Image (cartoon, grey):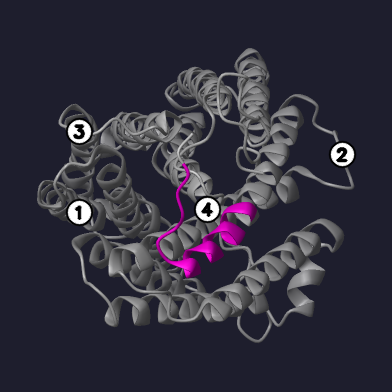
Amino acid sequence: MATTQVKYSSQAVSRLYFMGAIALFVGQIVFGVALGLQYLIGDLLFPAIPFNIARMVHTNLLIVWLLMGFMGAAYYMIPEEAETELYSPKLAIILFWTFLVAGALTILGYLLVPYATLAAATGNDVLATMGREFLEQPLPTKLGIVVVALGFLFNVSMTVLKGRKTAITMVLLMGLWGLALLFLFSFVNPSNLVRDKMYWWFVVHLWVEGVWELILGAILAFLLVKTTGVDREIIDKWLYLIITFALITGILGTGHHFYFIGLPGYWQWIGSIFSALEPIPFFMMTLFAFNMVQRRKREHPNQAAMLWTVGCAVMGFLGAGLWGFIHTLSPVNYYTHGSQITAAHGHLAFYGAYVMVVIAMISYAMPILRGREANPQRAQNVEMWSFWIMTIGMAVMVLALTGAGILQIWLQRIPTEGAMGFMQTQDQLRFFYWLRLAGGVGFLIGLLTWLASFFVTAGEDEPQGQLARA
């Protein structure tokens, strides 16, 4: 296996972020499987870890590890794109440990302290920011996230300013700055419920269906430049086109969350029309990936990274595009909002669009950080098996949740007379919940398989060397 070195020594700080992201990813999936069991065994782990706390840990770990993965990707990509060393590697390391410790303490706070007590002890009576889904973090944690984000953005922005400017770095910085600025709405918690939900969606929707798509597009473009050898000008044109559609549809598509929260009725038209267009940038990403692979000028030895890259484009379109489209029109959303169909869309969209792109970046970068262009073929084979196990496990989960959502709507929401109550309906969904649990266990097995690939060494017919990605 050919050896290689990172072009800039400061890129090595990304390894810390990748390792931290992987550890938090494992924790997220463990809590996800526990949640699946709690749907079926209601008193499992009660009162030590009730359902609401386990869910809070599951979703918060998802957000934190993806942010850590994005930061690691930026620290790897930007020095190479800017053709200069990172402005301050020491600052990057300090911010990593700050972020990791703050995140760990927050999770421990959720698990060990009653949430109301945690709120009272962390200044929520001074500035009330807690209690909203995905934004449950105590005030000190939110302030810490802002400090880490500003330090990170200062570091990468200064690196770009002193080096070469490329389309990839500009799009990446737009996404990262947008991510940080939109998070400031998490500090706005008005007493008016309509305004509260509106500002909450400014964070949640405009993150995952707005600025995160810019980060996704930039990472995909970088990976395709490196693995296919296609001219940068061609990839840049695709990237500009994709992010234009992503911003137009993502910003106005926020309206599909405004249907029934008290905002003017015209949002039903705006939300329906532009949300229906939101699959377009994801479909373009799929065409982009396959087109670049077809036009490739080299056969990159890291076939596992190529698989994750192309798989991300396809699964992102299915999860964020197709599964989002099936319940985005207001007459349909009237029945489906908050059902298990929403959960199916959320799981597949996050996995396809964001989890897979971070894994693809780790798969590409970590071997180089270890001094080789790609992992031994045996390690890549194990990693590619993990891709299929995780993807099939997620597919089982999503199909089970989709079936559960359809039955839930049929029994509970459509009938005008004789509709079942919530708990009666949940009893009818147990078969689908068992399937969902099976898919979750399968996904965990795939994740463990991916971790195992880190330690697979070269076969007898390959040069012996370091551990794959240990």
Q: Which residue is mark 2?
A: 45
Which residue type does callout 2 highlight?
Leu
The extreme top residue here reads 431
How packed is label 3: few (under 14 Cα within 10 Å), some, or many (20 or more)? Answer: some
Where the C terminus falls, by quadrant?
top right
How many numbered circles does the render carry?
A: 4
> Residue 84 at what x, y percent from top left?
34, 73
Q: Nearer the viewer, residue 294 or 132?
A: 294
Labels 2, 4: front one = 4
The magenta span reads 3-19
Labels 3, 1: front one = 3
Mark 3 → mark 2, Cα distance in angstroms? 52 Å
Q: Predominant secondary structure in magenta? A: helix
Q: Which residue is mark 3?
A: 296
Q: Which residue is mark 1?
A: 243
Reply above or below: 50 against 12.
above
> Residue 63 at what x, y percent from top left?
55, 55
> Residue 226 at what x, y percent from top left?
30, 46
**Magenta run includes residue 49:** no
